[in-house]
Amino acid sequence: MMKKNILCMSLASMLFLVSGSAYAAKTFVYCSEASPRTFNTQLSDDTVSGHASKLMYNRLVEFDRGGVQIVPRLAESWTVSDDNLVYTFTLRKDVKFHTTDYFTPKRNMNAEDVVFSFMRMHDKNHPFHNVGGAKYVFYMGMEMPDVIKSIEKVGEYKVRFTLNKPQGTFLTNLALETIGQILSKEYGDQLIKEKNKDQMDSMPIGTGPYAFKSYKKDSSIRYVAFKDFFAESPKVDQIVFLITPDQTVRVQKMIAGECDMIAEPPAMEYNNFKKNPNLKVIDGDVINISYLAFNVNKKPFTDVKVRKAVAHALNRKSYIDAIYRGRATVAESILPHNMWGYNDNLPVYDYNIDKAKKLLKDAGFENGFTTEVWALPVSRAYNPDGKKLAELMQSDLAKVGITAKIVTFDSTTYFNKTEEGYHTMAQLGWSSDNGDPDNFVTPLLSCASAESGSNIAKWCNKEFDALIQKAQTLAAADRAERSKLYEQAQLIYKNEVPSIPIASSKIYRVMKKNVMGYVMNPFGRDDFEFIELK
Amino acid sequence: MLAKLLIYKKRIHDLWDSGALDFVHSFVQNKGAVIGVCIIAFYILVAIFAPFLAPHSPEKIFTGQYTLPPLWMEGGTSQFIFGTDDLGRCLLSRLIFGARISVGVGFMVALFAFFVGTILGLVSGYFGGWVDQVIMRVTDLLMSLPSILLSIVVVVILGPGIFNAVIAVAIVKIPNFIRLVRASTMAEKNKEYIVASRTFGASHLRQIFINIFPNILAPLVVQTTLTFSDGILDIAALGFLGLGAQPPTPEWGTMLSDAKNYFIAAPWFVIMPGLCILFVVLGFNLLGDGIRDAFDPRLKK
Amino acid sequence: MLKYFLNKLLLFGATFIGISLLTFSLVRMIPGDPIEAMVGERGVSPEFRAQLEKSFGLDLPVHQQYFHYLSNTLQGDLGLSLVSQRPVTEEFFDRFPATLELGLMSLFIAMLIGIPLGIVAAVKRNTVFDYSFMGLSLVGYSMPIFWWGLILILFSSINFLHLPFLGWTPVSGRLSPLFEIPNHTGFLLMDAWFSEEGAEAFWDAVRHLLLPAIAMATIPMATISRMTRSSLLEVLGENYVQTAKAKGLGTFRVIVVHAFRNALIPVVTVIGLSLGSIITGAILTETIFSWPGIARWLVTSVMARDYTVVQGGTLLIAMFIVSINLGIDLLYLGIDPKLRSKSAG
């Protein structure tokens, strides 16, 4: 009898779980793509760590919900000196750090915490500078160590940043979670006392809407709602990141109802998700570009006619249909069409086999030639499947007599070798880090980055370089002026064809019907602050 | 004279004893084995006549016709009987050409492992001593690592590609051959006809290849057949992990790994390459079983 | 006896050295740069690179690197994972229970189905049962697991045919996020059973375990059923069974009491061997089902060029397999007196 009861109970409980109504205590399950490298994105620029840490922290200033406008957050207000060199922030007084079983704050957030957080990256002698490998990727990448002269506390709730030279993107940089998140100095002091400094980034304390609860490597991360959050209270009790690296498995779990939302849903499932009555699809626009870069120092791509021929040979429209399943637009410039400064009046290289053949003939390659196409080995929003794209390119190039071999490596080797210029043609792409056009043209096409690597076309054009350098030094306010310079630069780019822009992708997110309040920011990152379950 | 006589006697005796006719008889009696042979024959024929059977070139891309369903499903067309893949290539043609790859790699893996493994096993078993020690210790080492993991590491070292995958898979199959051949050789080398011909000064080479080798062939044939099927399976697994054949080669494992992204949208795209793999492997396993049973005197009774 | 034991132990030591050398050199042959693997795709300054190389001992000559590695390994230190920066041993033992749990469950399923199939096939030799069961087991034996796993998910979890009795096996994971189970042993079934949620969490864990275990059980099941059949057939033909039958004992009794017990020995050997090959079976299964075990961890580490993990993880797995084989050897030594006298002589 007893046995029977247990069996009944367990059967009942199985059915109960199947029905899916078990998430009674409001738990939001996000199927994420990988284990985060760290819970402090100042140390790592990957999206995964970004998602895992963003909901626990705040910045002095942040982007508005779903946009790129700078709005006050931990700072109530700020002033900028006339020479654009001194920024003074006044902080909110009501901001509390998380209370967890490993830390109980005794005071509210103040200027000490702000100085502590920035000096960690800035000052090599800071007690936490070397914790976690001392590589502050973005802080270094945005040249902040050179730009910032000093960071000082000038009052209990006042902080002053003094710069060496004006930086148009300074406020934007502070709003990035890869630079600007505010840690607790009090927690830092406690960890120094406990001789356990590594815990700073593995068991984090922040001011954000959700507090860290637990982390099981490769399995799950748990966050609980922070009741004393200084802004609008969080709407769900618990957020769980279920770490699900395989994209296919994430899709399967979404359909089986095991996730409330998944990371990076693949383009090809878009229509299926749309058709599914239990799911909701939200479209998003991101600022990104994928391109095929030539190595302009390698024959035969030293000849601009050959580069133009390839541009005419590629049927980019078909790539949008096959690889992006229509979830992208054909790109015509190195700047995405939705980035300010984009030039609408650029010449277009249409898909035209005859033109391509003629150009090849003019260049002396009537019988074509043999070359390589390097395929992007990782799936990115801007290029979901590099190998497939390469197969299509290969077939297109064959039609004009160019025999292309598909080459690919593991991702690190790939990025490395392209930076060192071993390729002849290689796929790559770029996503905006901060919503500024400079963030595209300088790393991708400047002479300096041809030298340092990220300009894999190895293309260096003095005229182009002068234009973008001039735009760089202008202050952020001179947007119209900068725009003009970028438009001119794009014209040069388009005539020289160091790379062929392929597509700017659209992305989308899929979630259960009852998920409300989701926003996606234009950098393609998910924001869970306002998540609700209805 | 005596030694030669002994050897002839042994050979004639063997032929009688193992009974080639008997073997064929019991093999044909075994329905499983016959089915296996039929399956394999079918695959080999498809592989040979692929260009005539396939309606399209396996690499031809039909722009705009992506993941079309097969003929019998809603939206299917007679142009693509099994539908198209994610890049608009005819799935049927790719499956047909895939037979070439799979049967080919199975053959290459089996041949490579057979060749290297048999030679090392013969040497190890025949000479014994330190040679044997060294070979066996290395064999033990290789066998203490999970075979697929070892294959993966080897492919990563050599770089992905069908030929490297064949080498990687063959390497992990070699130890099985070495052990088998060594054991049989050791059992064989102390038999009177070998001892006799040794006293009459037969060279090592002659001893190994003319006298011993033919007498240990029976278990080797079984092992080779099974390696055939294992090889096909492992190459497909590597392909599935993205380490085997590279695009646009129509290899079934690689096709599966493409297909799994279209799992829900296009289930047929997942189901068909898998069935192809399953049946060819089944065919070789049936054949291997059949040969083993036919050789096994206990079961013949 | 003692000599035999010492011999085995010596061999164990030699194998350890051999495997450490093998894994060390294999990893060194993998193209790519460990530092790049560690810092990701945005590059690294030359000074920082030099500093990292030094901290990982990569600036030393190769043979010194090996001795470093060996002596550290003997002290139980396999280094830090390049990707996660956590000790390899820690990462290994975090995941090991998941793999073992899956492996044991699949072995259990394989026996549960394989042995009865084999018995029926043997008893009803050359009937339609025999043919269909053995045919089925050969199909199982020929199954591409990576495909089979996908098919199982497609039919059972996604339930794309909308069958009424399917759809309750989760796609992946070990436990639904609803439950938060304290981690005591790492064996989730056990942890769940003794947790506050008790039976409910336990059944949830079973649901999660079922599909991957079935996929992984397919090949051992085929082997076990074939082995059961053939060894039972052999025993059934022997005199004492015939005698027992002649004595008028029921067929069932004869099979269970007399024949099966004796036929079990080779079957147990096969099961023991399957234990050693858990990892091999787990590699594809864990990949398909995103099972958080060591096999998938190793595969992803190979792909990500996490050299220390590949090196250390492979070594640990190999030692696990060698230890099991050694254990089986010693066990036989205890059971079978014939072996004992042979080894003494």
Image (cartoon, rainbow, N blue to C red):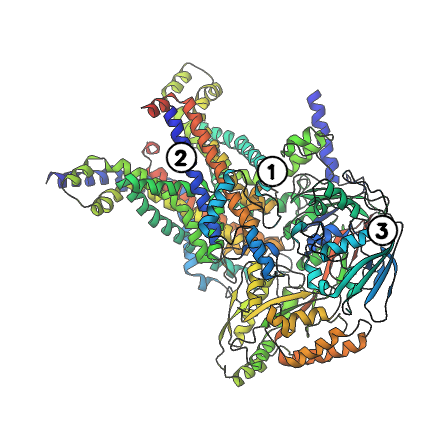
Q: Which chain letter goes with mark 1?
A: C
Residue toward you, A467 or B63: A467
Q: Which chain letter goes with mark 2?
A: C
Residue at image position (57%, 68%) is: A426
B160 in relation to B190, above or below: below
Q: Which mark is residue B33?
A: none
The residue identified by callout 1 is: C98
Horizontal side of A82 relative to A472 (left or right) equals right
Label 3 sits on what residue type? Asn
Q: Which mark is residue A110?
A: 3
Residue at image position (67%, 61%) is: A381
Work out which quarter of the rendered image holds the N terminus of chain A and state it: top right
x and y percentages locating residue A115 in the rendered image? 79, 54
Residue toward you, A230 or B259: A230
- Marks 1 and 3, how far apart in space? 45 Å
Q: Residue C11 carries which label?
A: 2
Residue at image position (60%, 50%) is: C83
- Dot 3: element: loop
- Density class for disc 3 (Cα within 10 Å; few <14, some 14-19, many ≥20) is many
- Label 3 vs label 2, nearer the camera: 3
